Image (cartoon, rainbow, N blue to C red):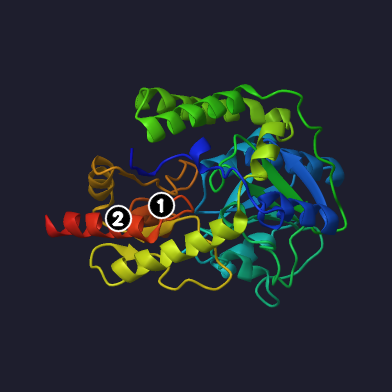
Amino acid sequence: MNEIGGDFCLVDLRRRVEPEHAYSRSVSRWQSGAGLSVYSSGRAAYYAILRHIVAESGHLPKVLLPSYLCPTMLEPVRAAGLEAMFYKVQADLSIDTHALTRLMRTGPSTIVICDYFGFHGSRRVLDEGHLPVADGHFVLYDATHSVLDPEPWKTAVWKPDVCVMSLRKMLPVVDGAFAVWLSSRSVSGPENPTSLSESASLRSLAMLLKASYLLHGQGDKNVYLSMYRRSESLVDEEYQQATGMSALSRSMLEHIDFIEARTSRRENYLRLLEMLGNVERVRPLFSVLPDDVYPLGFPVVADCRDELRTYLAQNGIYCPIHWALPDDIPADEFPESHGLSQRILTIPCDQRYTASDMTVVGKAIADFLGSR
C-alpha cells in the first residue's frame, strides 16, 4: 500500500545502520557531554522535572508557557499542581519577547521555550539582550521537533537549564524521551523498565500490524489505527509514574540512520517549497530552510485547511494538525495563536519519503486548488 503520513511503523527501521550513523550515537554524545535523564515520554520528563523544581525551591513556582502549544505540554504542569501562565506567540510562531519579559518580572518562574517544526526561532529569545537574565528563573527548552539536531541549544547565549526531547513524533520507536541537563543541576532519570508499559506494548503491536498492511495489504487498517490512538491515551494515564525508556526503543535507535533522516527531511522540504512556495491559498509557514534545521514537517497555512486535509486523506496523504489549542488559551487574549491553530496543516516530509513522493503531494494540492 502506498500511503504518505501517519504514525511510524516497523517498516521504517533499517536492517543495518553504520554505527557512526545510528541515532544512538547522538545519545552517547549527550551522555558524555552533559547530564542525561531518560524517560518513557515527554510528559513523563516534564512531570519529573517540574516536581524536582518544586522540591528544590521549596515552593510552587508558576510556569510560563507559550500561547501556541500542544495540550500535552500543559498536562504535566496541571498534574504537578503548578500555576500556568501564557505568553504571546505571534502568527509566524515568533515569541512576543515584551509579553514574556512582563511575566518574568512578576517573580521567579519556570520558562518553557518551544522549538516549532525544528526551526529555532524560539531559541533566539535566549540570545543575549532578548530577555532580562535574572536569578530564580529556570528554563526548560522543548526541542522535541529538533531531535535530529545534535545540539539544539548550541548557539543560545543564555543556556537553558534542561532540554527535553520526546522521540515518537520524529522517530520509529515505541516510547522514549531525553532530558539533557545543561546547567550545574542535574537529575538522575528513572531506572530502565524491565518490561514494556501497556502503551508501549500496544504501540509496538500497532507498528507491526501497520507494517503488514503496508507491505502485504494484510489486516484491517482501522484496527491498528485504533491501537495507535489507544496507546496515546494510555500515555496520559502512565506518565506520572515517570518511568524510563524501554529496552525495545533503545534497540530501535540502533536501526535509525540519523544522517539519512536529516538529509531526507531537508530534501523533501525543499522539494515541497519548490512546488508550493508561490501557490495562492496554501502558504508555507517557513519559506526559508536554514542550514541547521531538520524539519518535523512542512507546515502550511490555508483558510481551506479542513477541506484540503479531507481531500488529501482521500488520496492517501495523511496530514496532522500541530496543534488544536486547549481551552486554557483564551481566544480573545491570544487571537494570533487561535487563528493559526484553525488554519495550519503539517504536510509530511520525513525520512520515509522521496522527492517523487513530494511531487505526488504537491500535485494533489494543486489538483485540490484547481477544483475550487
Q: Is residue 297 left or right of residue 44?
A: left
Q: Residue type at mark 2: give it.
A: Val
Measured from the top left, where is residue 151 in percent x and y?
A: 70, 63
Closest to the observer: 164 or 325?
Answer: 164
Q: Is residue 264 above or below residue 124?
A: above
Q: Residues within 10 Å of mark 1 (few under 14, many from 20)?
A: many
Q: Pick the residue in front: 127 or 107.
A: 127
Tell me, for residue 59, which label it has, or none: none
Q: Name the residue located 53 percent from the left edge and 45 percent from the top edge.
A: 169
Locate the N terminus and report the quarter of the image it occupies: top left
* Res. 246 in view: no
Q: Considering only vertical position in the picture, is 363 above or below 309?
A: below
Give the CA separation, mark 2 to mark 1. Answer: 9 Å
In front here: 333 or 293?
A: 293
Residue at left offset 65%, top offset 24%: 197
In the rendered structure, which amino acid carries the disc numbered 1? Pro
Query: Which residue is tagged 1?
Result: 348
Which residue bears the numbered disc 2? Answer: 361
x, y percent for residue 260: 56, 58
Name which residue lies at 74% across and 34% down: 244
Residue contact between numbered discs 2 and 1, judged by CB atoms under 8 Å: yes
Query: Can you name the residue that lies furthest to the bottom here?
Result: 129
Left/right placement of residue 311 relative to residue 357 reads left
Q: Is residue 22 above or below residue 88?
A: above
